């Protein structure tokens, strides 16, 4: 009888153990499914998630699939071939290290900072990183968790707004035409996508178009593209009064332009400048790298052209007022 009770007890324990193992397996499967789902969610959002060891240049234990947006693979980081510090822009690396050290010393749990990184192709991107500092019970930092968001477009738009603002302030006090032309062109060339350009002025009497100021053009361009008569297709295109965005090669309208085919220009913009309804000047802006100018860049250069038109209107109004004063004093 006692033996039967003992066997029954063993069978009961075995069943409970089996049930417990089954529940543990279920819990483990559930946890794995949740982990897979979490990774899937991470990979769908426009951020890259890192788990770094708190060592020099931050070797990665984990990186999400979105690292591919910068041209890298997960394995390049998790294998140790690349460390995160290797892709931080050299001009920003010391600042990033210094900011992290200060936050750790001040016992921050998390913080946010912005800096530049280099993609695998060498392109510069701005990122915003939210860093979570993970320390043990003794306060020793073991890991850093980072959520990295590409903010390049946001930084570009901010820069464009600053260019517009600063130029507007400068133009409001400027009175010298040549000085203003230099200011306008230099402002356009601070836009990342634009590296060459010039400003044509249109003769009020003849309608001819002459290159008054330029940057980044070759001697060949200056020789063959610095003057267009009013009857030329180039001048007629400007006098339509609408912005034109094309490849440089598509703007070579006559056989006279054949010499310009060797010019290393890609995306170009012709932006007429108006005084009232009359076209008085034109911007010719170009990129040696980009094949197309973004909408945000187009908006800014068109705004700059409008600001120039306002400047011309102000200068001409002031000239008329001075003439009136002279005539009155002469009378």
Image: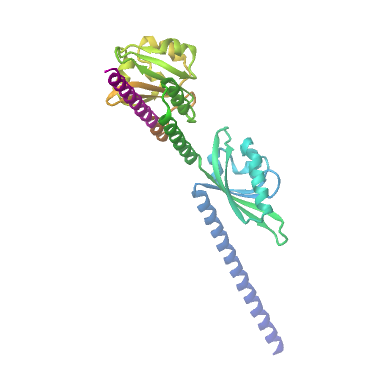
Which of these two is toward me, 326 or 272?
A: 326
| Residue 276 versus residue 151 in the image, above or below | above
Which of these two is toward me, 165 or 116?
A: 165
Residue at the location (73% across, 60% down)?
Answer: 138
**Colouring method of the image:** rainbow
How far across and down, in percent of the image, does residue 81 sit? 67, 40
Which of these two is toward me, 9 or 187?
A: 187
| Residue 16 versus residue 308 in the image, above or below | below
Name the side, left or right, on which 79 lies relative to 168: right
User: What segment carries the magenta color?
Assistant: 302-331
Which of these two is toward me, 22 or 138?
A: 138
Residue at the location (62% across, 43% down)?
Answer: 75
Q: Quadrant of residue 173?
A: top left
| Residue 331 versus residue 132 in the image, above or below | above
How far across and down, in percent of the image, does residue 220 sit? 47, 11
> Quadrant of the image for the C terminus?
top left
Q: Is residue 50 visible?
A: yes
Majority SS type along the magenta span = helix
How far across and down, in percent of the image, does residue 56 sit? 70, 44
Name the side, left or right, on which 49 lies relative to 221: right
- Is 327 covered by the magenta stretch? yes
Residue at the location (68% across, 43% down)?
Answer: 57
């Amino acid at each position: 009888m006692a033996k039967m009770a003992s066997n029954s007890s063993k069978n009961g324990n075995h069943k409970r153990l089996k049930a417990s193992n089954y529940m543990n397996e279920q819990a483990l499967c559930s946890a794995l499914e949740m982990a897979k789902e979490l990774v899937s969610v991470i990979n769908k959002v426009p951020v890259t998630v890192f788990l770094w060891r708190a060592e020099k240049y931050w070797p990665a234990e984990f990186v999400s699939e979105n690292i591919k947006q910068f041209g890298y693979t997960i394995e390049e980081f998790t294998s140790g071939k690349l460390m995160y510090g290797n892709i931080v822009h050299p001009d920003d690396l010391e600042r990033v290290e210094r900011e992290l050290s200060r936050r750790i010393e001040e016992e921050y749990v998390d913080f946010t900072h912005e800096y530049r990184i280099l993609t695998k192709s060498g392109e510069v991107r701005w990122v915003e990183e939210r860093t979570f500092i993970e320390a043990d019970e003794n306060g020793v930092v073991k890991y850093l968790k980072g959520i990295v968001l590409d903010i390049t477009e946001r930084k570009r738009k901010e820069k464009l707004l600053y260019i517009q603002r600063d130029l507007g302030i400068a133009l409001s006090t400027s009175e010298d035409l040549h000085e203003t032309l230099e200011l306008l062109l230099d402002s356009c060339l601070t836009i990342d996508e634009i590296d060459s350009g010039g400003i044509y002025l249109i003769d009020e009497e003849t309608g001819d178009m002459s290159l008054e100021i330029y940057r980044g053009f070759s001697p060949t361009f200056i020789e063959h593209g610095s003057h267009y008569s009013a009857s030329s297709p180039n001048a007629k295109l400007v006098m339509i009064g609408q912005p034109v965005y094309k490849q440089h090669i598509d703007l070579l309208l006559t056989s006279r332009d054949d010499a310009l085919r060797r010019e290393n220009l890609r995306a170009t913009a012709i932006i007429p400048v108006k005084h009232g309804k009359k076209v008085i000047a034109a911007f010719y802006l170009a990129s040696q790298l980009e094949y197309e100018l973004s909408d945000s860049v187009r908006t800014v250069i068109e705004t700059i052209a409008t600001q120039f038109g306002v400047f011309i209107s102000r200068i001409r109004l002031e000239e008329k007022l001075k003439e009136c004063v002279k005539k009155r004093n002469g009378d």
